[in-house]
Amino acid sequence: MDTPAEDLSYVIRYGVTRILGEFTARGFGSLARGTSVIVRSERGHEWGTVLSTATEQTRTYLGTSDAHGRIIRIATPEDEVERDRSILAEKEAFAGCLELIQERNMQMQLVDAEQVIGGERLIFYYVSEQRVDFRDLVKGLAKRFHVRIEMRQIGIRDEAKLLADYGDCGQPVCCNTFLREMPPVSMKMAKLQKATLDPTKISGRCGRLKCCLRYEYDTYEEHRKEMPPVGATVVTKQGTGKVIGQELLAQKLMIQYEGQRQVMTDAKDVLTVVSTKSSKSTSPAQEKHSDDRAEAGQSNNDRPRRDAKPRHDSRPNPRPRGETRSEKGSEEFGDRLDADVPDGSDAPDSDLE
């Protein structure tokens, strides 16, 4: 009696946008990484590549517990010929769609075209800063190519995912290889890692901040929390000093001791943290400026108030007695009425989905 074939699941990468999904297989045995297969997805028959065997860890990464579809067969030479035909059909479809867009003068940028194996569907990817009514365009495309048409609006980072090749590091761009979702990246991450703040050097092919700034941010943040902050007063074997800088990965602190002596010290050599201050007061010059302002404020408070005793006006032209209080008030506060009012009309930018 034959033993029924065991169903195996694999993580497959398919489609132009390099979608990741779990697919079941029966009767193929063990499939090695990199094997080309034909899968059945929700869009139809597609060309896919085996990445690994599906496990609980991969399901957690993919964020799903159900399979996307099944593996139809291992790719054959006939499938490779069909794939080459699909690539030529995609180029023809791209040129035809671009022509129709120009005829209708539509405010959209066509990025790429994708045809599912077998010619079941044509998918067009485009970028636009605003919503586009493409119903007439879809009718024209369906009439020309006689297949099901699908239009998908993507963002500028997705455009780089489709078209970009290599990054500044010399490696293939992350968004086109292993990244499933583009993580949010901010200038705070670049500052914490002491990267250059020149936008031209920390921006990727999409024009946005590089995704790799996000990779080590959690490690930097953990080290930052474990070390005394900038501005803290600490006690080490060399005496009492103030933290003026941090080297997070090296776990070192730049400490300024008495006499303006600055020494790079290991964080483990800190015996006691006497006090911590906000990281905003990071330099002695800023502290001196704040101390001067505090002393000035204190000296102003020590001055006698005007109403403490009668004031004798020693001006050469004293104000006449008949002058009203309203005239005095308007003259005294006239400069305040001319103050510039901040303009709050700038609205935040909105991203189109």
Image (tube, rainbow, N blue to C red):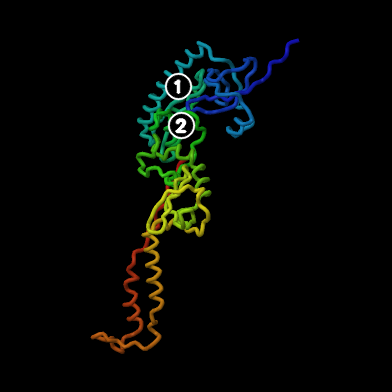
- The mark lying in front, picked from 1 and 2, is 2
Which one is earlier in the sequence, the residue at label 1 or at label 2? 1
Please give the residue where the numbered disc 1 appears in the rendered image.
145
Expressed as whole percent of the image width and height from the top left, the position of residue 278 reads 47, 57
Residue neighbourhood size for the residue with mark 1, other residues' Cα within 10 Å, grouped as few (<14), some (14–19), many (≥20)? some
Q: In the current view of this chain or complex, which residue is farthest to the front?
A: 237
Would you say the residues marked 1 and 2 are in contact, meaning their CB atoms lie under 8 Å apart? no
Instruction: Describe residue 30's horizontal placement relative to residue 241 as left or right.
Output: right
Quick one: which residue is furthest to the right in this view?
A: 1
Q: Which residue is mark 2?
A: 174
Question: Could one spot residue 222 in this view of the protein?
Answer: yes
When asked about the image quadrant of residue 2, the answer is top right
Q: Residue 296, located in which quarter of the rendered image? A: bottom left
> At 41% across and 59% down in the image, what residue appears?
258
Badge 2, how many Cα within 10 Å: few under 14, some, many 20+?
some
Relative horizontal placement of residue 352, taking residue 342 as reference (left or right): right
Residue at 38% x, 28% y is: 98
Q: Secondary structure at mark 1?
A: helix
Which is nearer the eye, 263 or 290? 263
Vertical placement of 255 versus 67: above or below? below
Total labels: the figure holds: 2
